[in-house]
Image (cartoon, grey):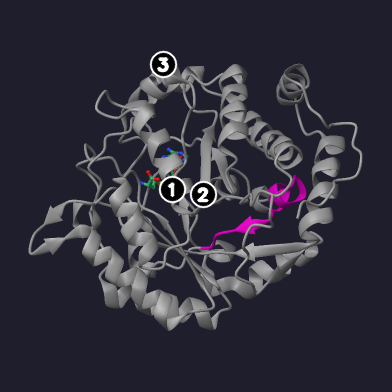
Amino acid sequence: MAIEISDSKFRPMDDNTIIALLSGKGPDEALYEEADRIRREIYGDAVYLRGLIEISNYCRNNCYYCGIRKGNTKLDRYRLDKDTILACCRDGYALGFRTFVLQGGEDPYYGDEPYGSTDGDERLCDIVSEIHTRYPDCAVTLSMGERTRESYQRLFDAGARRYLLRHESASPDLYRTLHPAEMSLENRMRCLYDLKEIGYQVGAGLMVGAPGQTLDHLLYDIHFMQRLQPDMIGIGPYLRHSDTPFGRSSAQCAQGLHREQKLNLTLRLLAVLRILFPYALLPSTTALGTIDPEGRTLGLKAGANVIMPNLSPAEVRDQYAIYENKLSTGAESAQQVALLKQQVSDAGYQIVTDIGDVKCH
Ligand code: SAH
């Protein structure tokens, strides 16, 4: 059943309005208030938690922006085994988490082809079904990159119900400049539509201020998502990592947005997304918390309703370095959930112990 959102001066929002809102400088309190009003109509003041378990930083891909790309030889690689992942879930459950997100690079060990004595799918399915059996009141979310449809189906059958796969850019031109030739936007889209058809709650998303990205690209992303109708949309500022092609290139740095601009543009886009996708689950991301100490709270006030603290074992957290200085301590750490609860309640919201499914569109 669809709930009617009460009248708003922002809806329906045409392309010119979107561009005007995104191109404004500094914060836009009226826009954030409107997004917050809509979020409260649907989700009240609830903030859903997801326990993020970064299960591997091995990756077969070479995305130009990402610190765990295959070509980064400076990085110490790790992968978590089944027992370690289950121990993270046990700790997370005790802390009140009812969603576990298994995220990783495209590690062949957990991939969709045979690897070693068994195939990667089988290893991952085994872990998913064990979590699903032990914690029937929890959701298992995967964020393990591009796979075959058959693999997504097997993982669904094993008990996974949500999948996060940011589309990164819906514009073929920008997608090509962010990724090497062997990756394709076409396959990324194929994955997202397969996931939807199988029955997953699907998360798309992108980095704000990625090198070469313009507001027209963001408009393109919005149009794409209006067709896809994702249940979740993850956005956060692009942050550089020096051991990547983009991090090394001074041209890319000089062109990019400043810290403050990226923060404001991310908040503006979050608010626009809340207005255009009233029912979406929108995380206030770690990248937002990394770019500004108040980022997570500002994200909530601009329409976000999900936080994904880090549940990975403390000793590997620094190694999942998709960008530099990524936060994983303090309120970013699942173990510090009391601190996070306080921050969220000071901002006017409440962390709930809830599986946090999307409300029907
Ligand atoms: N392999 C998985 C998980 C990738 S990491 C997948 O493909 O979905 C999760 C997200 O981190 C990516 O989708 C990307 O949008 C973001 N990310 C990667 N490098 C980043 C950077 N330098 N700055 C900000 N976000 C980044």
Q: Quadrant of residue 251?
A: top left
* Circle number at residue 163: none
In front: label 2 or label 3? 2
Q: Quadrant of ligand 1?
A: top left
In x, y percent, where is residue 53?
A: 41, 64
**From this viewpoint, is residue 55 visible?**
no
Residue segment shown in magenta: 297-309
Q: Is residue 181 left or right of residue 158?
A: left
Please state, as top left, top right, bottom left or bottom right, where the N terminus lies in the image: bottom right
In x, y percent, where is residue 324?
A: 42, 44
Residue 186 shown in magenta: no
**Residue bearing the label numbered 1:** 195
Above or below, 130 relative to 179 = below
Indicate which disc, 3 or 1, sits on the residue closer to the N terminus: 1
**Residue bearing the label numbered 2:** 202
* Circle number at residue 251: 3
Indicate which disc, 1 or 2, sits on the residue closer to the N terminus: 1
Give the spatial CA distance, label 2 vs label 3. 35 Å
In front: label 3 or label 1? 1
For label 2, count other residues whose C-alpha is less than 10 Å away and answer few (under 14), some (14-19) or many (20+).
many
Q: Residue at x 79, y 55 (%)?
A: 42
Above or below, 126 relative to 227 = below
The foreground one among 341 and 204 is 204
